[in-house]
Amino acid sequence: MKLGGGRSTNLEDRRGRGMGPLGIGGGLVMLILSLIFGPDIISNGDDGTTTDSYGEVGSGLSPADSAREEPKVVFVSQVLDDVQSTWESAFRSAGSDYRAAKLVLFRDGTNSGCGAAQSAMGPFYCPLDQKVYLDLGFFDELERRFEAPGDFAQAYVIAHELGHHVQHLTGRDERVRDLQRQNPGAANEMSVRLELQADCYAGVWAHSAAERNKLDPGDIDEGLGAASAVGDDRIQRRTTGSVNVDAFTHGSAAQRAQWFKRGYDSGSTNACDTFSG
């Protein structure tokens, strides 16, 4: 990709900070995680760390780690700003205002408006505080475990999460939650439709980036590879050895790639209506 700029003003860097006070809801999430991953996940220890302004504890990021990860931080910032600039223009053209999301970089765990954020959860968007949460280590997982290398594969992940922010600003996510409450049996199906729309929105941004000569040869193939790699069927097969379609929450590999490409080919959000039919 050919992006410019430095650190984004919408970036919150919390790397090097551990988990702090979680509250009741966060505590329950951590308890469940501890049952899955072991008790060490909720142990802060008595290591002389201090509490920071986020209510978290940690000894900070070492200079060596900071220097090593700085190119990744800058890249995340560049993608964040480019994606949001694209949506700001789209909202303005539609006569609406776009409110920028924040992106929180963390390591291992942090607090979010939606409860505890853990690296094991992968990147996610929290509508309650309008922030995307990302552990940079996920990009290594994306390349090694999911076999989806490349800078645009990483950009796709960020654009997908910001697609959820667009859904929040337009009220789509709240309407879906209402439908899920009214019909719990269709909750997974509604979740899949929401995720596929976010994939399509990522494709719409990719279309804009291509028009502005921001992409390199092979970038879209990287995006399609990443979308396929995180399909429910591939993840289920990798983790359990079998596929249960009824348990899908994000869509199959084929669906995710299809909707990303649909957004890219059209360049229009009108092509991203996964809720019709």
Image (cartoon, rainbow, N blue to C red):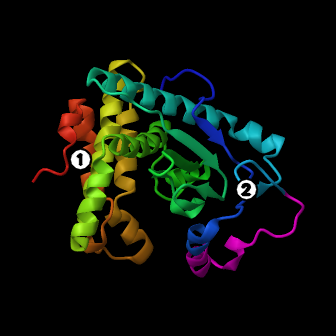
Identify residue type, mark 1: Gln
Give the crowd class for mark 1: few <14, some 14-19, many >=20 residues within 10 Å: some
| Residue at 69% from the left image edge and 40% from the top image edge | 69
Q: From the top left corner, tell me how far across and down residue 249 is, in percent.
A: 32, 64
Identify the image quadrant of the C terminus: bottom left
| Residue at 33% from the left image edge and 76% from the top image edge | 242
Query: Which residue is more in the foreground, 95 or 216?
Result: 95
Majority secondary structure of the magenta segment? helix
Q: In this view, does 51 lie above or below 33?
A: above
Residue 140 appears in the rendering: yes
Q: From the top left corner, tell me how far across and down residue 139 is, in percent.
A: 55, 48
Q: Is mark 2 on a helix, strand or loop?
A: loop
Q: Is residue 277 above or below residue 200?
A: below
Classify residue 3 as left or right of residue 22: left
- Residue lying farthest bottom? 35
Q: Mark 1 points at which residue?
A: 258
Question: Residue 243's image quarter?
Answer: bottom left
- The range drawn in magenta is 30-49
Q: Earlier in the sequence, mark 2 or mark 1?
A: 2
Q: Does the magenta stretch include residue 245?
A: no
Q: From the top left corner, tell me how far across and down residue 74 is, in percent.
A: 62, 31
Identify residue type, mark 2: Glu
Q: Is residue 37 magenta?
A: yes
Q: From the top left corner, tell me how far across and down residue 34 is, in percent.
A: 62, 77
Query: Which residue is more in the foreground, 183 or 258?
Result: 183
Q: Mark 2 points at which residue?
A: 56
Residue 252 appears in the rendering: no
Q: Nearer the viewer, mark 2 or mark 1?
A: 2
| Residue at 69% from the left image edge and 72% from the top image edge | 42
| Residue at 43% from the left image edge and 25% from the top image edge | 85
Q: Is residue 82 above or below residue 192?
A: above
